[in-house]
Image (cartoon, helix red, strand yellow):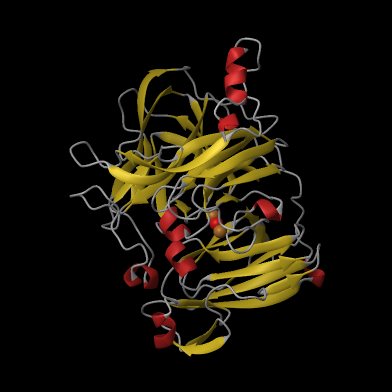
């Protein structure tokens, strides 16, 4: 282990000036899961004991270029086993970070070498995938940005990790337990403090007519962010990392389910001192500043012309539905809708018995992950899944390893996504080509739901 403390970074520093500005990532880069104390709540409240990557909330943003090889050694300095999932990356299955499916969880004091290439540019993130309901809520997440070879012309590129924390204001600590039945059976664990990049008072400064790229990442456990732009004109250019065919002007609310991302290009239109930024919808139907942009000065006298599309990623072909396999996935359970019974660990159990086992939800009649996958696919096969939400709650359904598209009622396709919001009583269908071999989870990203039944998997061989 000592070899890691004086690694390539120290070496590079010694050659300062002769090296490229971009650090050369090497096998010695570590991602340390560790305890830390961070001031999440406003001044005057106690600091929060968190679990973090490298001592900060969120963990350091990892910035790479498309096609790069990412190497990180996870060092587990926590008292519990953990693992890292690289959300949205079309990754080698062995590097996907799902404890018990793609790797063994890393024990306290242990390490795991993550090593994979980044085929797609875009906005991604990394987070714990061992008991994630608790570990992500305690702070184990960070942004992973993969830059295009030909990046759009903007004045600044900003990562905004939207999150929330459920804190006890008297102690600053997280409200426990993390597996409270009320959270599991309802909307999940939503925080009482909302923020961006670990700050409840996040703010940027910008000049009028400046153009920013905002990479929004919903890293919250369960909160769906509904956002509006203020003092800015914006276009959505990518969703869940994947570029849209063309920029779509933001005219309405932006809805981000847990784990979803949106890349916006925004032009500051507000005058100096006028309010600007991202507003979020509050439960009482008001709008509050989530991320403020303080406008000072002017970068040009006129706005820029509208932005152009991002360069496309490889593998964006529409799935060929003519020979697709079609499966139904009924989503059921939770408070206010209930379910009669479901299979759990090979047995059919009634709702009461399921609850005793901590299972509140089921996908296709099955609570929790099973030995056999929901679907066993041959490489290159196309799968359509019809999701029917018979619960009383929305769910952000996430597929690992591959992006999918919504198949709309009129037969047209939606954009590539890795997470889609399913709302009660509105069936929706997704389709994808199974072009990445391995064992891939499909689960709700309201992490308390995933932990209490809403997790299944797909096998591609
Ligand atoms: Cu971001 Cu299985 O999750
Ligand atoms: Cu859910």
Residue positioned 56% across, 43% down in the render: 74
Q: Is 28 placed left or right of 172 in the picture?
A: right
> In this view of the protein, can residue 87 be seen by the observer?
yes
In the image, is residue 381 above or below residue 165?
below
Q: Nearer the viewer, residue 152 or 247?
A: 152
> In this view of the protein, can residue 249 be seen by the observer?
no
Figure quadrant of residue 284: bottom left
Which quadrant holds the N terminus?
top right
Q: Is 46 placed left or right of 121 in the picture?
A: left
Task: State the image coordinates of residue 131 (x, y, percent, origin top left).
Answer: 47, 60
Which quadrant holds the C terminus?
bottom right
Task: State the image coordinates of residue 26 (x, y, percent, origin top left).
Answer: 66, 31
Task: State the image coordinates of residue 206 (x, y, percent, origin top left).
Answer: 41, 24
How many numbered markers are drawn?
A: 0
In the image, is residue 245 above or below residue 457?
above
Task: State the image coordinates of residue 307 (x, y, percent, origin top left).
Answer: 60, 32
């Amino acid at each position: 282990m000592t070899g890691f403390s004086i690694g390539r970074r120290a070496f590079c520093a010694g050659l300062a000036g002769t090296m490229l500005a971009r650090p050369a990532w090497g096998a010695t880069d570590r991602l340390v899961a560790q305890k830390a104390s961070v001031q999440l709540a406003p001044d005057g409240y106690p600091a929060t004991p968190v679990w973090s990557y490298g001592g900060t909330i969120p963990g350091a943003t990892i910035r790479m270029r498309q096609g790069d090889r990412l190497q990180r050694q996870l060092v587990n300095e926590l008292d519990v086993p953990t693992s890292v999932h690289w959300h949205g990356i079309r990754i080698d299955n062995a590097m996907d970070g799902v404890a018990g499916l793609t790797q063994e969880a890393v024990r306290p004091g242990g390490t795991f070498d993550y090593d994979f290439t980044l085929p797609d540019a875009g906005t991604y993130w990394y987070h714990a995938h061992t008991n994630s309901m608790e570990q992500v809520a305690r702070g184990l997440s960070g942004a992973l940005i993969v830059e295009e070879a030909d990046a759009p012309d903007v004045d600044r590129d900003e990562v905004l990790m939207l999150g929330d924390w459920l804190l006890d204001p008297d102690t600053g600590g997280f409200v426990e337990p993390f597996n409270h039945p009320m959270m599991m059976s309802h909307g999940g664990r939503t925080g009482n403090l909302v923020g961006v990049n670990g700050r409840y008072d996040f703010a940027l400064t910008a000049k009028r007519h400046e153009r920013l790229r905002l990479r929004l990442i919903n890293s919250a456990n369960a909160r769906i962010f509904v956002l509006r732009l203020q003092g800015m004109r914006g276009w959505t250019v990518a969703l869940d990392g994947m570029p849209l065919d063309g920029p779509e002007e933001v005219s309405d609310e932006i809805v981000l389910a847990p784990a979803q991302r949106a890349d916006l290009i925004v032009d500051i239109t507000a005058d100096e001192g006028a309010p600007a930024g991202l507003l979020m919808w509050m439960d009482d139907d008001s709008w509050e500043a989530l991320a403020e942009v303080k406008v000072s000065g002017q970068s040009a006298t006129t706005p820029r012309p509208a932005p152009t599309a991002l360069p496309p990623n490889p593998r964006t072909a529409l799935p060929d539905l003519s020979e697709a396999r079609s499966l139904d996935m009924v989503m059921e359970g939770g408070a206010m809708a209930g379910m009669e019974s479901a299979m759990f660990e090979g047995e059919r159990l009634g709702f009461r018995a399921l609850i005793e086992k901590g299972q509140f939800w089921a996908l296709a009649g099955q609570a929790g992950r099973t030995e056999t996958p929901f679907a066993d696919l041959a490489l290159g096969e196309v799968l359509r899944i019809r999701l029917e939400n018979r619960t009383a709650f929305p769910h952000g359904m996430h597929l690992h390893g591959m992006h999918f598209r919504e198949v709309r009622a009129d037969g047209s396709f939606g954009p590539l996504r890795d997470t889609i919001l399913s709302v009660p009583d509105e069936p929706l269908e997704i389709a994808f080509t199974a072009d990445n071999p391995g064992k891939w989870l499909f689960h709700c990203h309201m992490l308390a739901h995933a932990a209490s039944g809403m997790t299944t998997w797909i096998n591609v061989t």
